Each structure stands twice: as C-alpha cells, then as structure tokens.
Amino acid sequence: MALDSWSKGEEQDAARAKRLAASYVAAAAVVATLLGVGVAFGGQIKKRVLEEEVTVKFVPREPVKLPDPPKPPPAPPPKAAPKSAAAKGAHRDPPPTAIPNKPPEEGDPNNAKKEEAVGDPNGVVGGTGRGGGGAPTAPPAPPPPPPAPPPPIQQIVEAATPPVQLSKSMPAYPDDARRQGIEAVVVVKFVVDELGRVRDVKILRGHPLFDDVVLSAIRSWTFQPGTIDGKPTRTTRKVKIPFRLKAS
C-alpha cells in the first residue's frame, strides 16, 4: 500500500470520529432540553392542581323548630244550680185562714153532671168528626160479591160421552225446521167447554220451532161437547202431534 493512501485513510477516520462526537453532543443537548421542559411543565401542572383544590367547610345544622302544642279546649260554662223547693213554692197562694162553708164550684160533681148533659139529644155518640150538629152519614155500601167460580172440569168416565171433534186443521211443517232437518213430537193439553170451544191450551212437551204453529192450529178446532147424563160438561183432552220428515 502507498503512503499517500494510508494518510488519507487516517484523515477520513478522524473526520468521521469528529462527526460522531458532534452527533452525541447534539443528542445530549436535545435530551437535556426535553428534560428541562418536562420538569418545568410538571411544576406548572402541580402548582395548577394545588391551586384548584377547594376547601370544604362544615356548617352546623340549624335546629328544627317544632310547632306549638294545641291549646286545650275551653272549659264548659258552669251549670245553673237547681232551684230549691222553697224557691219553687214561693209563688203559691197563702194557706186559707178560715174554713169555707161550701165547696168550690169547679169541684162540685153536680155542676159537672149538668154540663155533661148539655148537648144535642139527636147527635151521634162519639161525634161525627165534622163539628156541629146534623144528621148522621149513611154507612158505606158493602162490596159486591165475588164472581162465581167456573164449573169444575169433569173427567170422562165410562157412563159419559166424550167430545166429538167437528173441525181439525193440522199445523204445517215449519220451513226453518224442514231446512234444518229437525223432527219432533209436540204434546198438548186443552179444555173443551160446554159449547165445544177449545180453552186453556198448554204445551206439555214441544220444540221452539213447532210450538207456535201447533197452538195456532189447536185453538181453531171445534168439538161437539162431551156430556154426562145428557148434559154438556167441560172436559180435558190431550193430543200428540208428530212432525216427521219423509225419507227421500
């Protein structure tokens, strides 16, 4: 190796070392600057925190004032003292000083009898309640007698003749029951009077869809009345009316 090249290499190493030392110094200065800034800001922050602290004071609680107790009710007024017997008898008449020769007029029974005898000899004993004299009023008329009960219903016996039906219109099958396919048997009880008319029709067993048409039909029936010993009499009858749909 030549001597010139060796000297140049040493110069380059020395320059590199100087640059490296300068870099270290600059870095140390930057670090020191940052530390100083941090310490300064830290003191400011601590001071700020200390300045913002609030002091808490405890104030004693004021005593609660209780309401005044209610006043007692006023005492009742004193009762008046009862009057004594001497005070009650203070206004009585003085006792008599001499014995009277005749009894007083208001105490004479003969005068009382005379007063009671005065009056109208034609008056009503006990009075009429109208004041003054006058003829007595007539008593109210008695109520009319109740109507006579209807003759009893006679049951048909072997010696009697039962009623004979003269007209008989059968009830029509209701449309609602036909559409719904409902069948029923209606049992009816009624009375045939002395003129052969139907009275007191009652449904013993029925159905809401059939009852009205059955009642309407039976009330239109007429009979020759039943007889007992040849005399018309009231009799009871019971009939069954079936409602059946014919098979298609």
Image: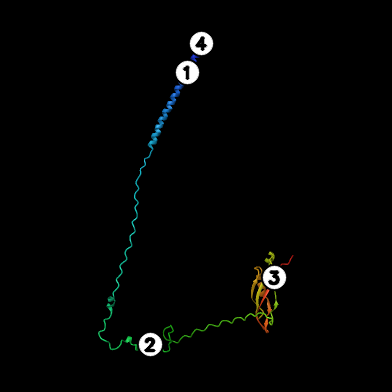
Q: CA distance from mark 3 to mark 2?
A: 88 Å
Disc 3 or 2, which lies upstream in sequence? 2
Q: Amino acid at mark 2?
A: Glu
Q: Amino acid at mark 3?
A: Pro
Q: Amino acid at mark 1?
A: Ala
**Circle 1 sits in a helix, a strand or a loop, which is it?**
helix
Disc 1 or 3, which lies upstream in sequence? 1
Task: Please tell me how crowded label 2 is: few (under 14), some (14-19), or many (20+) other residues with Cα within 10 Å.
Answer: few
Name the residue furthest front.
158
User: How many circles with numbers are drawn on the protein?
Assistant: 4
Tell me the residue that label 2 is attached to.
116
Observer-nearest residue: 104 or 134? Answer: 104
Residue 155, image x, y percentages: 66, 79
The answer to whether the residues at label 4 and label 1 have Cβ atoms under 8 Å apart is no
User: Looking at the image, is mark 1 or mark 2 nearer the viewer?
Assistant: 1
The residue that appears at 44% across and 26% down in the rendered structure is 31
User: Looking at the image, is mark 3 or mark 2 nearer the viewer?
Assistant: 3
Task: Please tell me how crowded label 4 is: few (under 14), some (14-19), or many (20+) other residues with Cα within 10 Å.
Answer: few
Tell me the residue that label 4 is attached to.
4
Q: Amino acid at mark 4?
A: Asp
Q: CA distance from mark 4 to mark 1?
A: 20 Å
The residue that appears at 38% across and 87% down in the rendered structure is 116
Q: CA distance from mark 4 to mark 3?
A: 153 Å
**Circle 2 sits in a helix, a strand or a loop, which is it?**
helix
Q: CA distance from mark 1 to mark 2?
A: 171 Å
Q: Can you say which quadrant of the picture contains the C terminus?
A: bottom right
Task: Please tell me how crowded label 3 is: few (under 14), some (14-19), or many (20+) other residues with Cα within 10 Å.
Answer: few
Residue 26, image x, y percentages: 45, 23
Name the residue furthest top.
3
